[in-house]
Amino acid sequence: MDAKSITDDVKNEVNKGIEKLTMLRDEVKLHIHLASLDAKQEWNDKLEPKINEVSTTAHTASDASKAAIHDLVSKVEGFYAKLRGTASSS
């Protein structure tokens, strides 16, 4: 595998991660009004700004960008799962 195809693979992974973060962000925004104050604060203060930051800087498409996106996707998926669990038990 040559350097260009590795770079292209990383860029594709980064783009997929950004697309997933965008989808998760939209889903969370649909459900956040039902969340507790702590959950809203976590979303507004920590997760949503990080999504914006990663989306802006990730276009450099490095392995570090890829790792940061995967980490953030995991955190947002966990938050969304917790949010949905809280909303359904209300």
Image (tube, grey):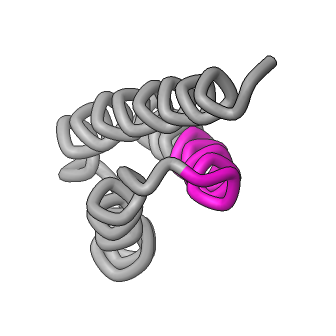
Q: Residue at x 56, y 44 (%)?
A: 73
Residue 86 in the image, given as x and y percentages of width and height: 50, 44
The kind of secondary structure the magenta stretch mainly shows is helix
Residue closer to the observer: 46 or 87: 46
Q: Residue at x 46, y 25 (%)?
A: 16
Q: Quadrant of the N terminus?
A: top right
Residue 39 in the image, given as x and y percentages of width and height: 42, 66
Lateral position of residue 9 relative to residue 3, left or right = left
Vertical relation: 84 (above or below) 43: above
Vertical relation: 33 (above or below) 48: above
Lateral position of residue 59 relative to residue 29, left or right = right
Residue 74 in the image, given as x and y percentages of width and height: 65, 44
Residue 47 in the image, given as x and y percentages of width and height: 42, 66
Q: Residue at x 19, y 36 (%)?
A: 30
Quadrant of the image occupied by residue 19 = top left
Quadrant of the image occupied by residue 27 = top left
Is residue 82 visible in the rendered structure shown here? no
Q: Which residues are magenta?
A: 62-77
Q: Quadrant of the C terminus?
A: top left
Is residue 86 visible in the rendered structure shown here? yes
Q: Residue at x 57, y 39 (%)?
A: 77
